[in-house]
Image: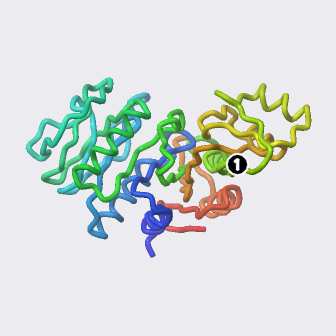
């Protein structure tokens, strides 16, 4: 089995019709992963829709101008993207215009008529993303892939399968990369509150100050928040708190797999060692698309 098929199968096994791809940081291989899932779905004859929480598929990074992988889309693909970023070309068939606004104009639903490279600028809000995904399904998409962002996990939806990308772009230490991935998966995978256990409900954000006070008090009740986006702890701080407190959510998310990229702009780490370290930290299927291996 191709590793891209493994990722797609993991998502579909949850019953999800939408897959969000998010990274622990920039340049960890998110576009490559999204492209791989897209190609795997196309190979099965599925009608695929694509959209983004931010910006994806541009020729050069919007922040530092470094060249990036492109999104080359096949005929029949559905796209929800900003009109100001979509190419003015007969290769795209305009289907609909949503009421979602972005910095690059309103978001439109288009169908690719001839193979094209497309830059995705998507909805800037959670409600806008939900509207775009619904519009893609309304126009015939069987599955929707969403380019996500670590600073916009509030836009993730309970019905999305989530794939987490990590890599050497965020750190030169295998231990640090694995810990960062483990913390993000732990955050996204906080279990649903079952309503049976004695609980302390936290309205709004659950902050490091809240966590420190509860740990110091020896809190034994289950701590319940609305969803993972309300928890503002990250990294090792989060992992430390999860060892001491039972945190549950009312609306869980569903991380299904993790991908690794052993090469960063400042250097690289040993691929097999990274794959195994991340697999141990996340307890989910872990894939290296660049080396075509999995753990």
In the shown orientation, is residue 22 left or right of residue 48? right
The image position of residue 78, as x and y in percent, is 24, 50
Residue 172 in sight in this render: no
Q: Eyeballing the image, is 222 above or below 281?
A: above
Image quadrant where residue 204 sits: top right
Give the residue displayed 21% in from the left and 32% down from the top: 83
Of residue 141 and residue 120, the one placed in the foreground of this image is: 141
Image quadrant where residue 220 sits: top right
Residue underneath mark 1: 195
Query: Quadrant location of the C terminus?
Result: bottom right
In the shown orientation, is residue 19 left or right of residue 170? left
Give the residue displayed 18% in from the left and 54% down from the top: 115
The image position of residue 67, as x and y in percent, is 37, 39
Residue at the outermost bottom position = 1
Total labels drawn: 1
Q: Eyeballing the image, is 287 above or below 225?
A: below
Image quadrant where residue 258 sits: bottom right
In the shown orientation, is residue 151 left or right of residue 4? right
Give the residue displayed 30% in from the left and 59% down from the top: 142
Kind of element beneath mark 1: loop
Residue at the outermost left position = 90
């Amino acid at each position: 089995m191709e590793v891209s098929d493994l990722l797609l199968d993991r998502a579909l096994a949850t019953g999800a019709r939408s897959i969000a791809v998010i990274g622990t940081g920039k340049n960890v291989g998110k576009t490559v992963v999204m492209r791989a899932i897209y190609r795997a779905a196309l190979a099965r004859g599925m009608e695929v829709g694509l959209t983004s929480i931010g910006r994806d598929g541009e020729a050069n990074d919007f922040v530092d101008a470094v060249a990036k992988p492109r999104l080359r889309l096949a005929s029949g693909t559905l796209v929800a993207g900003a009109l100001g970023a979509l190419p003015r070309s007969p290769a795209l068939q305009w289907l609909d215009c949503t009421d979602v606004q972005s910095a690059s104009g309103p978001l439109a639903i288009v169908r690719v008529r001839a193979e094209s490279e497309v830059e995705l600028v998507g909805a800037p809000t959670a409600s806008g993303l939900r509207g775009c995904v619904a519009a893609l399904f309304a126009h015939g998409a069987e599955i929707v892939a969403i380019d996500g962002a670590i600073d916009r996990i509030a836009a993730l939806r309970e019905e999305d399968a989530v794939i987490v990308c990590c890599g050497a772009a965020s750190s030169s230490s295998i231990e640090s990369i694995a810990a960062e991935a483990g913390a993000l998966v732990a955050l996204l995978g906080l279990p649903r509150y079952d309503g049976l256990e004695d609980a302390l409900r936290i309205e709004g954000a659950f902050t490091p100050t809240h966590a420190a006070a509860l740990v110091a008090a020896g809190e034994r009740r289950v701590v319940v928040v609305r969803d993972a986006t309300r928890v503002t702890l990250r990294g090792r701080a989060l992992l430390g708190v999860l060892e001491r407190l039972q945190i549950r959510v009312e609306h869980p998310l569903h991380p299904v797999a993790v991908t690794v990229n052993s090469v960063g702009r400042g250097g690289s780490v040993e691929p097999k060692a990274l794959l195994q370290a991340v697999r141990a930290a996340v307890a989910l299927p872990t894939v290296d698309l660049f080396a075509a291996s999995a753990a």
